[in-house]
Each structure stands twice: as C-alpha cells, then as structure tokens.
Amino acid sequence: MNPILLQMAAGGAAASGQKGGSTSYIILMVVLLAVMYFMMIRPQKKRQKEEQEMRSSLEIGDEIITIGGIVGKVVTIREEDLVIETGADRTKMKIQRWAVNTNVTKTEQHRKEVEAAREAAKEKKNNKAKKDKE
C-alpha cells in the first residue's frame, strides 16, 4: 500500500477528531484490493494459463487461427515456432508459437463432447420419465 495515502488518512482522521477513521480507511483499501484481485487479476491469469496450455498442446494436423487471422494446418512443431500450411495451394508459413490465437480442432472436439454429454443427459432424463409413467 502507498505510505503517503496512509499518512493522509491518519492525518485526516486525527484532524477531524475521528478515532476509527484510519482503521476504516485501511479496511476499505484492503477490501478494494481484494475485490480488484478477484475481479481483474485472477481471471486474467487464468486466461493466460489456458492460452499457454493450448499453445503447448498443439499437435501436427491441428487447424489453428493466428492472432492476425491466418487460418492454417500445423505441419511442423519446433521449440518456439510452427510451420503451417495455408490455402488451397498449400503455402507454408513459419510463425511464432505465441501468435496462435485459437486451436480450431480442439475447440470443435470440445464442442462435440459437450453436445454428446447434453444428448446423453436428455436421453437419461427421457428414459427416467418413461419408467416413472409405467
């Protein structure tokens, strides 16, 4: 915390004759920092971690979209860069791993798994309703 702000808060409380003014100010600052952490910093770190995991789990054959909007298929994977094929003429491009924005293959696979789980849940619910009617 900023010591100047604490001194101002303590001085303002003493000047106005309030005894609990500085402690309430400190509590308010702590609560504000906690809210900021849970609303801004923590979700950002979570997103960064998910992006890093996605980039490190790229495999040959995955279809990706780069930050610049280039769509391609991964051909070669190296330490810090990838080689992708784009377009019908199979043009190869070398890009940095950090430039990958989306792994379309994994996204579609995840979407299919979620849909299958929903269908299974509906089927189970329908079967249970049929048994209850009988």
Image (spheres, helix red, strand yellow):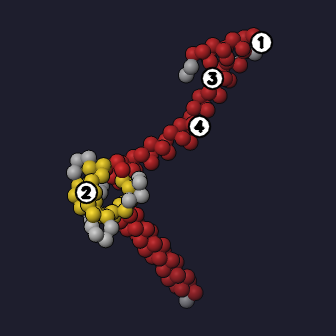
Marks 4/2: CA–CA distance:
42 Å
Q: What amino acid is found at the position of numbered circle 2 in the picture?
A: Val
- Tell me if label 4 and label 3 are in contact, CB under 8 Å: no
Which residue, given by chain and number where applicable, does mark 3 sit on?
A: 26
Q: Amino acid at mark 1?
A: Gly
Q: Quadrant of residue 10?
A: top right
Neighbourhood count class around disc 1 (C-alpha, 10 Å): few under 14, some 14–19, many 20 upward: few
Among the 4 quarters of the image, the one containing residue 103: bottom left
**Kind of residue at badge 4:** Val
Q: Give the number of the mark in front: 1 or 4.
A: 4
Measured from the top left, where is residue 27 in percent x and y?
63, 26
- Label 3 to label 1, Cα distance in Å? 17 Å
Give the CA distance from mark 2 to mark 1.
69 Å
Which mark is on residue 35?
Answer: 4
Query: In this figure, which residue is indicated by the disc labeled 1?
Result: 17
- For disc 3, the neighbor class at 10 Å (few under 14, some 14 to 19, many from 20) is some
